[in-house]
Amino acid sequence: MSEREATATLPLLSLRQGLGCMEVWWVVAFFCCYFLMWTLLPLLTGSEVPGDNIEQLRWATEPAWGYDKHPPWPTIVLWLLEHVLPTGVPLTYFLGAVQAALLGIGAALVARDTLPWPAKWLAPLLITCISYYTFRMHYYNHNTALMVAYAGALYCCSRIRSTWQMRWWVALGIFWGLGILSKYQMVVPIACNLAFFWTVREGRLRSIVAGVFVAGLVASVILAPHAVWLINNGFPSFEYAATRLDAELSLLERIDDIFRFLTHQMLRLAPILVFLGLLKWGSRTNRPAGPDVNLPAADPEVRRFYAIHFWGPFVAMVMLCAMLGTDLQSHWGTAFLWVLPLYLLATPFGVRLTASPLPLVLRSMALVQVLSAVSFASGKFGGGLGG
């Protein structure tokens, strides 16, 4: 093949064949534009400042180890950064984008550790289609902080699964502690972590028990100042959480609430379907060049890993409503929906998805972002698709 012919086939490289220097820069450029657009768009369109951002700014004027509604970690982070960056609403928007970036990095690391290597590119790209992380990227609150803690905990679990080294149990305990300091809902991801380790306990039970003990001890140390604050202040954030959980809905109201909650989650995932449709349409005339490389599908343990960590939180919330009558809030899915692309990539369909040419993937992703931005700017869906 001549140099000119080789150059002509370069734009059709698929994810399976690897990314050259130019392709990596195209991916980097996409993410830079993505974060810049969704951070600035709320400012440029004059969108109302989220109440949660204002609340964080108010709490940061009086730093404490707890507040009437929530634990203190997001406020502590904001308070610390206010000492080195200009304070105000733009800072909270910046922090919202930083958290979305950390989520993408976490997803890429987990994918690299558990899935065929092209997934480390596709996982964060697919996550950019979920409207929780676009329409409300500028949100900075306890749900977004929990999202980052969950990503960190999931990566630690994947490393534990691979190495069984104690240092990763220590890291897991750090994310457990920071997650609970972000929002008490972190107990659900912790339960999912433990459920997965229970499924792989054969021959490793003693190691798992020791690791869970160490992780729990580390988390307890991190939570100690907040626990002291709770005792000294009469557990106000516990009372607030209890009022949100104890709605006492009737049977028909519970059915309606579960349907509404799940419907809202599916709407947040709808842009992924648009992306897959564009990819299917574009692939008719844009086939990857070069030999097809057969990548092994993820093993059953990996699929179980993602199934537990995606379905587990939503099953728990549905059961909470069904058994206790809790009024489910749509934003309670913020911290968990991003696991779906990873679960998808662990299936045979996900493996086939990695054969898509990178230019086609990026063009389809860019079109989804443009359509989402037009929708946001028009205000038709801005009030209902966030998280």
Image (cartoon, grey):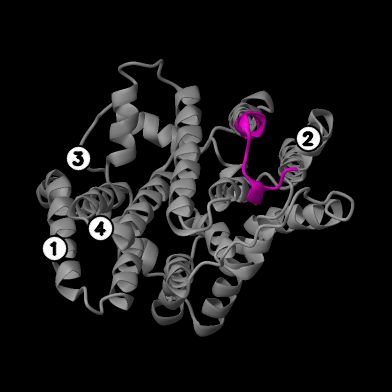
Where residue 158 sits: x, y (%)?
Answer: 36, 58
Q: Circle 4 — which element?
A: helix
**Dot 3: within a 10 Å radius of its alpha carbon, few (fewer than 14), some, or many (20 or more) residues?**
some
**Residue highlighted by disc 3:** 65
The count of marks equals: 4
Checking the image for residue 238, the label placed there is: 4
Q: Quadrant of the N terminus?
A: top right
Of discs 4 and 2, which sits in the foreground? 2
**Residue highlighted by disc 2:** 6
Q: Sequence-wise, which precedes: disc 3 or disc 4?
A: 3
Residue at image location 72% in from the left, 46% down from the top: 361
Q: Sequence-wise, which precedes: disc 1 or disc 3?
A: 3
Where residue 169 sits: x, y (%)?
Answer: 22, 55
Q: Nearer the viewer, residue 270 or 250?
A: 270
Q: Sequence-wise, which precedes: disc 2 or disc 3?
A: 2
Q: CA distance from mark 4 to mark 1?
A: 25 Å
Farthest bottom residue in view: 251
Residue 288 drawn in magenta: no
Q: Sequence-wise, which precedes: disc 2 or disc 1?
A: 2
Q: Is residue 40 visible?
A: yes
Circles 4 and 1: CB atoms closer than 8 Å: no
Q: CA distance from mark 2 to mark 1?
A: 56 Å
Farthest right residue in view: 285
Q: Circle 3 — which element?
A: loop
Q: Nearer the viewer, residue 38 or 276?
A: 276
Q: Is residue 354 left or right of residue 191?
A: right
**Dot 4: within a 10 Å radius of its alpha carbon, few (fewer than 14), some, or many (20 or more) residues?**
some
Q: CA distance from mark 2 to mark 3?
A: 60 Å
Circles 1 and 3: CB atoms closer than 8 Å: no
**Residue highlighted by disc 1:** 213
What type of secondary structure mainly makes up the magenta span?
A: helix
Bounds of the magenta segment: 13-30
